Amino acid sequence: MAALLYLDRLFVYNADARVGSELSDTLTVIERKPLKGIVNAAMAAMSLTGPLLAYRLEYWLSPWLPAKMALPFMVSAGHRYFAVLVSTFGKDGPCRRARFYRVVNEVPTGLMIAIVVLVAFKPF
């Protein structure tokens, strides 16, 4: 989650940087490294261990599990979107304004809070 939050902030800075500038090129490299080194490995681990843990602890009998499982799938979809953005920034392709990335920056935070609440309180 920390790497996803970090990537969002880098997107804001990269959107403000002039296309083709040294800052833009540096930010593109900085965006690619956590995506490839941390986020991809974490998503693979989550995809393998999450369902296994739910099965092992017999959480599959709990009614809150579908909601809890939907949220990590949303995080995974966000990860895929961020990978596309890193590729787009790397090719100096069209990007949106920094304001858009500031709003997108809040989505992983909201998902993280919702996941923790569902796990900690099991509301239903």
Image (cartoon, rainbow, N blue to C red):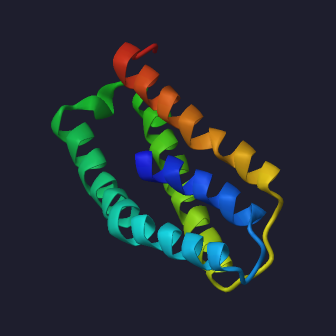
Judge whether residue 4 can be spotted in this image: yes
Choose top left, top right, bottom left or bottom right for residue 85: bottom right
Q: Which residue sits at x=50%, y=51%?
A: 6
- Quarter containing the N terminus: top left
Q: Which residue sits at x=48%, y=34%?
A: 112
Residue 101 in picture, x, y percent from top left: 72, 52
Residue 100 in picture, x, y percent from top left: 79, 52
Q: Nearer the viewer, residue 80 or 118?
A: 80
Q: Which residue sits at x=18%, y=32%?
A: 57
Q: Nearer the viewer, residue 15 or 37?
A: 15
Q: Is residue 12 above or below residue 41?
A: above
Q: Is residue 120 above or below residue 35?
A: above
**Tally of marks:** 0
Residue 120 in picture, x, y percent from top left: 35, 18
Residue 79 in picture, x, y percent from top left: 52, 59
Q: Residue furthest left?
A: 56
Left or right: where does residue 54 sit relative to residue 11?
left
Q: Nearer the viewer, residue 5 or 51?
A: 5
Judge whether residue 63 can be spotted in this image: no
Q: Is residue 79 above or below residue 6?
A: below
